[in-house]
Amino acid sequence: MKLQYDTSSQLLSIGINIIIPDNYIPREPEKANEILMDPINTFQIFYDAQNEIYNRKLKIS
């Protein structure tokens, strides 16, 4: 994983390598896309939840 923070724009970039063995990827493009997108979507849900928790803490303080 690679993290990079740009102080001027206050943006954090997170680079993640997802390694999926070839034998797990189906030959049908739709199913392959679904399998490849699943970890990305899971991370997005996690990130959004963490953001929501952080924003709530800021409002309480």
Image (cartoon, rainbow, N blue to C red):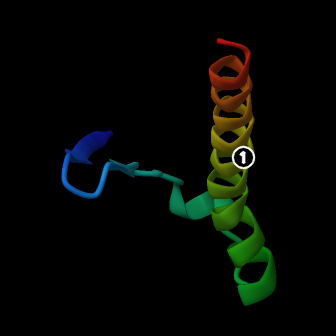
Residue linked to disc 1: 42
Residue 38 image position (x, y, % from top left): 73, 57
Q: Residue at x 73, y 15 (%)?
A: 60
**What quarter of the picture does the N terminus occupy?**
top left
Q: Nearer the viewer, residue 23 or 57?
A: 57
Q: Quadrant of the C terminus?
A: top right
- Residue 27, image quadrant: bottom right
Expressed as whole percent of the image width and height from the top left, the position of residue 25 reads 65, 67
- Image-quadrant location for residue 49: top right
Residue at point 31% right, 49% down?
10
Asked if residue 57 is positioned above or below residue 30 in the image, the reply reads: above
Q: In the current view of this chain or complex, which residue is farthest to the bottom?
A: 29
Q: Decide if residue 58 is on the left or right side of residue 5.
A: right
> In the picture shown, does residue 22 fall above or below 20?
below
Residue lying at 72% horizontally and 63% vertically, measured from the top left: 35
- Decide: few, some or many residues near mark 1? Use Cα within 10 Å; few <14, some 14-19, many ≥20: few
Q: Secondary structure at mark 1?
A: helix
Q: Is residue 51 left or right of residue 4?
A: right
Could you say which is closer to the camera, residue 13 or residue 43? 13
Tell me if 17 is positioned left or right of 39 in this view: left
Q: Nearer the viewer, residue 13 or 24?
A: 13
**Amino acid residing under circle 1:** Thr
Could you tell me residue 17's position as x and y percent? 39, 51
* Total numbered circles: 1
Query: Which residue is located at x 47 percent, y 51 percent?
Result: 18
